[in-house]
Image: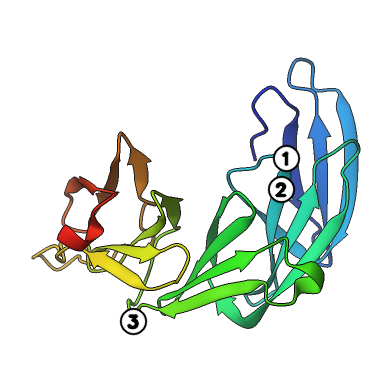
């Protein structure tokens, strides 16, 4: 994966058997190794990284059951494993400060507070959107935005986990309507930009999803 602005480059490498994952940091100017940490389990990085690197912990069947928080101070600082209330299939995630938003096959959207002491109450909320597929989430303007398989853009209140807005469906009229991977929404200039299965790219007011 990439690195931190003005900081080291990070590499996340799972072992062949999925029993452990190595996180390493190298100097961006000359590739000099800085530090390396070996963590238990099959882990994949959540972007963007900051002073903290978040990773999804999954089993060999692709079900994610925890979020791992690695402090990036010095030679890799403390490690916290935050379990999910229930495993998530085909999880995608994005970090927004200390919160990681996770989507899964079947339409689950979950907010995980990775600072929760002992992992208690770490799952702030879970919303079942009923969408067959969701994109990787994007957070901003007090909401979490995800694209759905039928071309809708969904806006969910970041604090309460309730649906506060959605756009109209944008489906392709031809035979090829399935998109194996949906692009994540992008927030820029006060608007949220999304792509749909019909080939359209559109932008909506991020601060007023109730009017979509």
What is the number of the mark on residue 128? none
Q: Secondary structure at mark 2?
A: strand
Q: Quadrant of residue 43?
A: bottom right
* Rendering coords of residue 117 (x, y %): 79, 68
Please report contact status of discs 2 and 3: CB closer than 8 Å, yes or no: no
Q: Quadrant of residue 6?
A: top right
Is the residue 70 above or below the residue 83 in the image? above
Is the residue 101 above or below the residue 185 in the image? below
Q: CA distance from mark 3 to mark 1?
A: 34 Å
Residue nearest the observer in this picture, 186 or 144: 144
**Which residue is labeled 3 in the image?**
130
User: Counting other residues with Cα less than 10 Å from the Cα at mark 1, is it few (<14), some (14-19), or many (20 or more)?
Assistant: few
Question: In the rendered view, does 1 fall on the left or right side of 129?
Answer: right
Q: State which mark lies toward you, 1 or 2.
A: 1
* Rendering coords of residue 115 (x, y %): 73, 61
Is the residue 69 above or below the residue 33 in the image? below
* Rendering coords of residue 122 (x, y %): 67, 72
Q: Is residue 212 visible?
A: no
Question: In the rendered view, does 74 fall on the left or right side of 126?
Answer: right
* Rendering coords of residue 56 (x, y %): 67, 63
Q: Quadrant of residue 136?
A: bottom left
Q: State which mark lies toward you, 3 or 1.
A: 1
Residue nearest the observer in this picture, 169 or 167: 167
Q: CA distance from mark 2 to mark 3?
A: 30 Å
Mark closest to the chain's N terminus, 3 or 1: 1
**Which residue is labeled 2 in the image?**
53
Q: Is residue 3 visible?
A: yes
Is the residue 148 above or below the residue 88 in the image? above
What is the number of the mark on residue 51? 1
């Amino acid at each position: 994966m990439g690195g931190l602005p003005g900081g080291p480059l990070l590499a996340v490498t799972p072992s062949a058997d999925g029993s452990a994952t190595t996180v390493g940091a190298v100097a961006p100017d000359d590739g000099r190794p800085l530090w390396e940490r070996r963590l238990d389990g099959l882990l994949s990085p959540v972007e963007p990284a900051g002073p903290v690197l978040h990773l999804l912990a999954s089993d060999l069947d692709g079900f994610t059951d925890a979020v791992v928080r690695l402090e990036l101070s010095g030679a890799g600082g403390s490690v916290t494993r935050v379990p999910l209330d229930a495993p998530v299939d085909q999880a995608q995630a994005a970090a927004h400060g200390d919160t990681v938003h996770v989507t899964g096959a079947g339409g689950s959207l979950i907010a995980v507070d990775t600072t929760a002491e002992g992992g208690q109450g770490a799952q702030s909320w879970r919303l079942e959107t009923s969408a067959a597929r969701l994109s990787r989430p994007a957070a901003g303007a007090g909401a979490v935005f995800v694209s759905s398989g039928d071309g809708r853009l969904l806006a969910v209140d970041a604090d309460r986990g309730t649906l506060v807005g959605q756009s109209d469906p944008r489906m392709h009229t031809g035979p090829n309507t399935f998109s194996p991977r949906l692009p994540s929404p992008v927030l820029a200039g006060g608007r949220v930009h999304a792509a749909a299965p019909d080939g359209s790219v559109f932008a909506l007011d991020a601060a007023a999803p109730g009017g979509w």
